[in-house]
Image (cartoon, grey):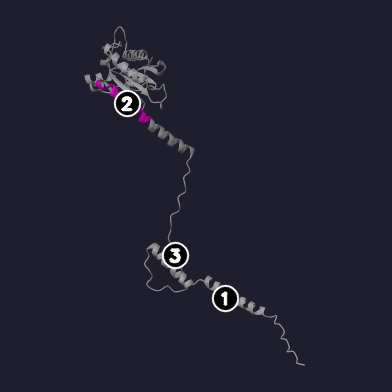
Amino acid sequence: MRQRPEETPENHERWLVSYADFITLLFAFFVVMYSISSVNDGKYRILSQTLVSAFTGQPEAAQPIQIGTPLLDSSRLIDLPPMPKPTPITPQAARAAASAMHSEARQQELAAVAQALTERLRPQIDRGEVQVSVTPLGVSIDIRDTLLFPSGQASLEPQAMNLLKDIAEMLTTWPYQVQVNGYTDNVPIRNGMFASNWELSAMRAVSVVQTLIRYRVPPERLVAAGYGEYHPVASNDTPEGRAANRRVSIVLLSPDHPAGTPALARGGAELKRNVQGSPSSAGQPPSKV
């Protein structure tokens, strides 16, 4: 009988080949990762100093940078100013800003009122009988006494009615408080009707107020004041100056001022100097009616 060839036993260790290949690939992977993560200090320093030279304007080094030298010299460091701290807006600052904006708007409003009055009273202004101006107290309409009253009297002339009617029509369109001020020159007056310039100036202001009420200006918005001779706008040494001082002022008081504050007809700096510098006006309050 023929003998069967012996069967070669099956090899169960073939997995070792695949395992060895896997370990080799894994080792190669970690070697590559390590090489990538390694930094060349010398090249890094060269790159850093090149960037510093570019941004600071310092010339490049004539000698090559040696590995192991300090990265930066302390003299080449850039000192940047500290960042400013934000300034918080306090309630006081906010109120001040709001007040400034309100005051500017109020001045523009008063300027518009003065412009409207100037256009309405243009003929009298051109003749020098009326003057319209903006003062710290409001809008002032100065009227020469020759356009309103006979000399030494407080009864209005007929031609004054048309002027006061025009002014009254304008006043009814605005909500301002109105103060009417009477002024005289320094020539003493003594007649059967008035014992002094105080009485004459006060009664002239009252006459104008009564006429404005007749033309439908609300009486609760009106006040009359007599200042006599103590707030001149010109020198009383000349006839022209005395004529300028004899006047009636209709003042539209600015809402920024108390409603009952006496309003000088030309309440700017010029009149303030005259009032404070006049020794005869010391202790002389206006005569109000």
Amino acid carrying label 1: it is: Ala
Residue drawn at point x = 39 percent, y = 17 percent: 222
Which callout, 2 or 1, points at the residue further toward the start of the chain? 1
The x, y position of residue 27, in whole percent, is 59, 76
Q: Which of these two is toward me, 287 or 253?
A: 253
Amino acid carrying label 3: it is: Ser
Q: Residue furthest bottom?
A: 1
Residue drawn at point x = 60 percent, y = 77 percent: 24
Q: Which residues are magenta?
A: 106-123
Q: Which residue is mark 3?
A: 74
What whole-number distance in Å separates the C-alpha atoms at marks 2 and 1?
94 Å
The x, y position of residue 74, in whole percent, is 44, 64
From the image, give the main secondary structure of the stretch colored magenta.
Answer: helix
Determine the image quadrant of residue 155: top left
Residue 238 shows up from this direction: no
Which callout, 2 or 3, points at the residue further toward the start of the chain? 3
Q: Residue furthest right?
A: 1
Q: Which of these two is toward me, 246 or 161?
A: 161
Image quadrant occupied by the N terminus: bottom right
The x, y position of residue 212, in whole percent, is 35, 15
Mark 1 burial class by Cα count in 10 Å: few <14, some 14-19, many 20+: few
48 in the magenta segment: no
118 in the magenta segment: yes
Mark 2 burial class by Cα count in 10 Å: few <14, some 14-19, many 20+: many
Q: Which residue is mark 1?
A: 28
Could you tell me which secondary element the residue under label 1 belongs to? helix
Amino acid carrying label 2: it is: Ala
Looking at the image, is 50 positioned above or below residue 256?
below
Q: Does the CB distance between marks 2 and 3 fall below 8 Å?
A: no
Determine the image quadrant of residue 228: top left
The x, y position of residue 100, in whole percent, is 41, 34
Q: Which residue is mark 2?
A: 114
